[in-house]
Amino acid sequence: MRALVLGGAALALALSSADATTLREALVKTYGSSPVLGSARAKLRSIDEGVPLAKAQSRLQVAGTVGLTQSTDGIASLDNGGRVLTGGVNLSYPLFQGGRVRNQINAAEARVVAGRSDLRSAEGNLFTQAVAAYMNVIRDQAIVELNTSQVHVLETNLRASKDRFAVGDLTRTDVAQSDARLSLARSALATAQGQLTASRESYRQVVGEWPDHLEQPPALPSLPTNPDDAVKVALDNSPAIQSITANSQAASYDVSTQRAAKLPVFSVTGGSSYNDYMGTRAQSAGLPKGTPGLDETVGQSRIGVSMSVPLYQGGLVGAKVRQAQEIEAATREQAIDVERQIIANTRGSFATYVAAGEAIVAYERAVSANELALQGTQAENSAGTRTVLDVLNAQQELLNSRVQLVSAQRDQYVAGFALLNAMGRAEASALNLEGGALYDPLANYKRVRNKANDWSEDAKYKPLGTHTSGPTPIDPDVQPVAPPADLVDPPEPLPPDPGLPPTPRP
């Protein structure tokens, strides 16, 4: 249990052995198969598309039209005979839009930065959950082992108590106390086994596979020696702070975008049209059929400059500007709130880490003292100066101190990793995982930022997450808690207790 020694210079997660999973392997598996990360990455890719969406509004717009018109003398009559086939191409290129597009692009770029920070947060939070799930399994395995050992010890005690009772060395009360304590130990073992199964299921949910055998974790990197240093690192490096800062910048650009609706818009327009009267030009012009000198096809091209000046829009622009200003105000308040959360989380994780370390020292001393106390109580019981109940109590206190030691070791490791996460040092790039290439959030951004093809699409997405719906493996650590056959009491009552005097009659 004392192998969980914390501290060190780097998170050098050890390579796995043939029959055990290391913490490094668990994190690599989590990184490569988690639906949480797959969803976060897809969300970031959708945010990347905000940049080409904004840029599209500054590019040439081309539209084509085709139509066929038939003139009639009535709803159901085609006696007039005039018809025309029309086609055209219209072009528009914006020259000035009041800064709207520029600010939309800037806002989209800022939101991409925020999205990358959110992905870092998702990685750090997921790895913190994976570490907690890993340590929970190790803790609960140790607690099951301790309770199993306690049951075996108490079974031996009960056998010895029954043997001594048979020769008149102990009373029925001593046997009953041993039996009761064994029953409680079996109950505690069953509870510990249930908790171990629940922890293993939580591990499978986060990591994506069943934890057969887990190695003890490596040492954590060196952590700050005081909470102020930890807070300074967190404020400088926290992805949550970087995300809300970028979102505040985007909200500021949104205000400028809405203000641009008050300004005129200049555009270059052009186009070409084609009309084919299909031999009915005279009828279409209201002239006698067969009138000479009429061309059946007419084409026309045009180019010009247009200006649209908003004079009054019913208060729409003012409302949108005020709305954007309030959203910006909200993000600025959120930035302060996020900063408070980061400070609180950092100081809380630091305090938990330090407290758990102090608890480990105290529980280690308690285990040593209880081991000595148990030995002394057993010796004194053999000499007749201590009762069986004293021995049982000493055994229970030793078990309790060992369980508390294991729990404190788990708490310190998880709190230390949570402190790394609060400081922005728990994502994949900071952990130096060696399970293949890391996801590059810049790759998709560079791929799409300047795309101008209306027919461009991505292939159908294949989920990253793996399913965990397979059968649960047989858990050797979780077995039915049944008493041995030789400890099952017979149905008939016990013989009279030779160690007790007869009860006097009134």
Image (spheres, rainbow, N blue to C red):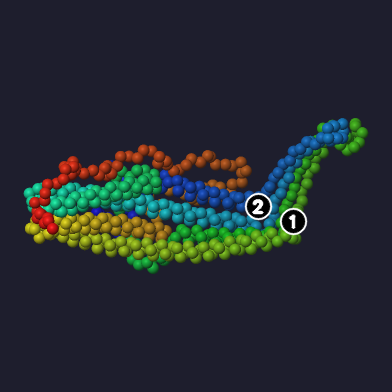
Frontmost residue, 309 versus 389: 389
User: In the figure, is residue 249 to the left or right of 497?
Assistant: right
Give the total of numbered labels.
2
Of circles 2 and 1, the one toward us is: 1
Query: Under tag 1, what secondary structure?
Result: strand
Mark 2 vs 1, N-terminal side: 2
Amino acid type, mark 2: Ser
Amino acid type, mark 1: Ser
Which residue is the site of mark 1?
308
Quarter of the rendering occupied by the N terminus: bottom left
For residue 58, which numbered disc appears in the image?
2
Residue occupying image coordinates x 11% and y 49%:
496
Crowding near the residue tagged with mark 1, few <14, some 14–19, many ≥20 C-alpha atoms within 10 Å: few
User: In the figure, is residue 499 to the left or right of 421?
Assistant: left
Frontmost residue, 452 versus 482: 482
User: In the figure, is residue 356 to the left or right of 422?
Assistant: left
Please tell me in which quadrant of the rendered image residue 465 appears: top left
Query: Under tag 2, what secondary structure?
Result: loop
